[in-house]
Amino acid sequence: MSVAASKTRKAKRPRTPATPTSGPTAPQGPRIIGKVRRSHVASTFGAGAVVDMRAPTGAPLSGLVAGLEEWDDAAPKGHAGLLHVQRANEPRLQKRLSVGGFRLPPVKDDDDTFWSDVLPIVRFPRWLLCPRCEKLARDDDFLQEPNRPERWCGVCTDGGNKVFAVPVRFIVACKRGHITEFPWIRWIGCTCEKPRLKLETVGAGLAGKLVSCAGKDCRSTRRSLEGAFSTGALAPLRFRYCTGQRPWLPLAPESCQETPRVLQRGASNVYYPVIESALDIPPFSTDLSQIVGIYAADVTRNAPERWPDLIDMLDLTGKTGKPKDVLLRLFADWKQALDADSPDVPLEWAEYLQLLTSEKQPVDQGEFQTRPESVPPEFGTHLGGVVLARRLREVRAQVGFTRVNPPSTSFRSPTSRMGMLYGQALPWLPAVELRGEGIFIRFEGETLHLWETNLAVTERARLLAERRGARETDPMEETRKTSPRFLLLHSFAHALMRQLSLTCGYSSAALRERLYVGFEPRDMAGVLIHTGSADSEGTLGGLVRQGQEERLENAIREMLVSMDWCSSDPLCITGTIALSSPGNLAACHACLLAPETSCQHFNLRLDRAMLVGTPEAPHVGYFRDLLAELT
């Protein structure tokens, strides 16, 4: 577990709650307020994310995970950056992200009194509400104890029974990742020097939330929050453009021309992590590579003729027990693999080639242990190969995040609206290591090509492209992700994960997909369903067992039968349910949608019809002929 501690920044009181300012970090010790799972800190609760906590006293707290610079400030002396003992490496991913290594989110044992590593949290929002008298004010207008994060209402507190103030539910964010307070004072047009706001609940919904000011000379009127979530609702309040606030970073606001949007503090669209990941494959997966992998950046920075001196300087022969010539051969293998890795080539391409090799012969290379498995005869014309991965290691690094909408472009794209994890570029990024097992399934190329060029299939895929409309995306990437091949493999992965979770011993949230989709000159058509844990090594073995020929045949057969009918049909198969979500066609929570941790693509670009067809066009389904035999 990562231990979260509140962090206080000294800041001038803003003129209006819509434009708070940032200041230097106050030199105070950590105040432990809660815990977060390590794997979540490098994803849904990364830097800039809103985290809800409860103080030891039971007081509700809310804050933003601070930027990476403050992670270093919170680390023990001499352990900042890549000097930290809790770090990870993956040379291919490091090269792609231009970093020297990865930091694991800090972990502190409950009985550890020496190691002071914590995850810093900055209070947000600063507007709080008394649940009893409904007083609405900033945090420093409530009572507090020195160096404690709790705030309570002095009017409602009776003796030792404190009535703690709770964070307000409404905030403002924009598509570039900025976030700030809801403009409570502007919302009602209050001009008081010292506003005395109240947020009363008089009925259901936003119309039942009334904001008012009890100031003696205030001329403002009570106003409900109805319409606050509509686009442009803040424009009449001199809030037409975003204020560029980044309270998780110790930086001043930046210029921003985006339209601000009112969001609920706990909504999923407040924070979408941007994740880049890679599997450990030979030669980086060997046991020796795991030992000397932390020096990969040093090796790649130096010319081969300097490697012997580097080995001596770092005493690698003593640390590994291997002679110098063995280490030199390993470094040469690293260099050859990294030189072949181009920024224009997807990271998945090298993994896909390695998995194709595993279809022919077993591979036992440290963290990458695979063996071929026979394709079930019943699916021989549809599936081209199966590989069982007994051991896998995946490194998942967070490079940024978005708000309001999921990321739709590469983080390197000029049109990217990604929020930053840091104020100034650092030589590291937060990441987690996942070790587990998996099943790789490759689709048969000729059958797939005939199916995806069928006019009815391409027309259905075009419906999704039209539904998504004009977006600021990479046109080539958007074409790939709305292609029949992508929709088929993505939907197949979700359907199979749901089916396997019933028999493999893992929950659906513990299974993950990794898609291999590409076209010439790097043709890919495969799905890896894998599992892993960031907190322990090893696997239960249940997933690999389900990949054995007979068991996999039963799993796919049962999956197709279950996908043929959804409890939400006919609304689901006709796409009516997904009309409010233009990222999908025939997909809903009853059939295809998976837990957030399981999907690479935020549960978007799914279509059950690509698997089993529709009542009007059954031949659209890739497996429709097999399904007809099963039913």
Image: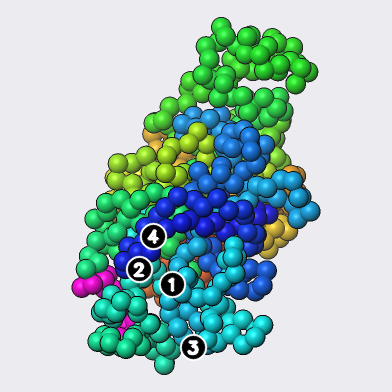
Q: How crowded is mark 2: few (under 14 residues within 10 Å), some or many (20 or more)?
A: some
Q: Residue 242: within the magenta?
A: no
- Do callouts 2 and 1 mark residues in contact (Cβ within 8 Å)? yes
Quarter of the image with the N terminus in it: bottom right
Q: Name the residue under label 1.
A: 138
- Where does the magenta region start and end? 223-237
The residue located at (70%, 58%) in the rendering is 506
Kindly identify the amino acid type of the residue bearing the numbered disc 1. Answer: Arg
- What residue is drawn where x is 26% and y is 58%? 258
Residue 346 vs 560, above or below: the answer is: above
Q: Residues under labels 4 and 3: Cα distance?
A: 28 Å
Q: Give me the residue at 42% from left, 63% from top.
A: 269
Q: Nearer the viewer, mark 2 or mark 4?
A: 4
* Dot label at residue 308: none
Q: In which quarter of the image is the C terminus?
A: bottom right
Look at the numbered discs 2 and 4 and tell me whether their residues touch, using CB distance below 8 Å: no
Mark 2 or mark 1, earlier in chain: 2
Badge 3, how many Cα within 10 Å: few under 14, some, many 20+? some
Residue beneath disc 2: 17
Residue pointed to by mark 3: 133
Q: In what element is the residue under mark 4? A: loop
Q: How far apart are marks 2 and 1 (CA)?
A: 9 Å
**In the image, what residue type sits under mark 3?**
Cys
Contact between marks 3 and 1 (CB within 8 A): the answer is: no
**Mark 4 or mark 3, which is nearer to you?**
4
- In primary-sequence order, the first of circles 1 and 4 is 4
Name the residue beneath numbered marker 4: 12
Q: State whether residue 49 is above or below residue 352.
A: below
Query: Where residue 403 appears, x then y in whole percent?
Result: 39, 58
